[in-house]
Amino acid sequence: MPPLLCLLAAVCVGLSKSGFPGVSLVTVALMAEAFPARESTGILLPLLIFGDLCAVQAFRQHTLWHQIVRMLPPTIAGVFAGFALMRNVPDAAFKATLGWMLLATTLVQAVRTAFPQLGPSLPHSRWFAWIMGFWAGVATMVANAAGPIMAIYFLAVALPKQNLVGTSAWFFLIINVFKLPFSAALGLLHAPSLKLDLLLCPLVLAGNMIGRRFLQKIPQRLFETLLLVSAVGAALKMIW
């Protein structure tokens, strides 16, 4: 079963980077089921970076750099906080911690899916950017699960879909590369995990191509609802 979970997770990475951030929640759950929860975050990180590179190549012309510059400081602060959390949470409790983080992020995605009109009505204030950025930084360091949080923010500032995907691509590429030394310091990056990542990269590319060419035929609301149900179930399993 773990090899199949890895294959599915890699495809989900590609899907999540092609405009469906909710898929990232399922990716986290699959990898945490296939490997010990803490180790799964290190295995997943290089795959996310490869997915970011694919997304940058496809959507780079739609990037809004002023949004990236605005969100980098609070997100980086959140990464430091998440790193401290990972160093102090015992291995036995980390899977439950990951489950709670996944559950909270799933709630954000559920609100975004159920009430898309709330996004543009949120204020363009610095405090909102710092709250969302800091939470995204903690979530991405602990669980690689910041996609829905940043989607909420980008909807709040009324980014069109193409700009949302293009800006997210560069933003997460920068943040995920920034996270590499932290994951290495925690002992989560090593030769066997990188070899596995290399084998899974073609499936990330395949998932990205599927997301770009075919998923527009599936109603996004139905698609994300099914993913959210799966993510909630996985999070509850991690917690209990």
Image: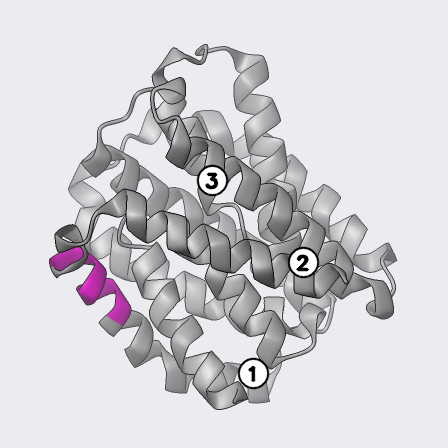
Camera-nearest residue between 10 and 228? 228
What type is the residue that disc 1 sits on?
Ser
| Location of mark 2 (residue) | 236
Tell me the distance, in whole angstroms, between the alpha carbons under discs 1 and 2. 26 Å
| Location of mark 1 (residue) | 193
User: Residue drawn at (72%, 66%), measured in percent from left and top?
Assistant: 185
Dot 2 crowding, Cα within 10 Å, few <14, some 14–19, many 20+? some
Q: Secondary structure at mark 1?
A: helix
Q: Secondary structure at mark 3?
A: helix
Residue 55 x %, y %: 27, 55
Q: Nearer the N terminus, badge 3 or badge 1?
A: 3
Split into 4 quadrants, where in the image is the C terminus?
A: bottom right
Q: Is residue 10 above or below residue 175?
A: below
Dot 3 crowding, Cα within 10 Å, few <14, some 14–19, many 20+? many
Residue 23 x %, y %: 40, 56
Viewed as shown, does residue 25 lie left or right of 102?
A: left
Tell which tag, 2 or 3, sits nearer the viewer: 2
What type is the residue that disc 3 sits on?
Gln
Q: Is residue 70 above or below residue 170?
A: above
Residue 209 belongs to magenta span:
yes
Return the mark for residue 109: 3
Residue 115 belongs to magenta span:
no
Tell me the distance, in whole angstroms, between the alpha carbons under discs 2 and 3. 16 Å
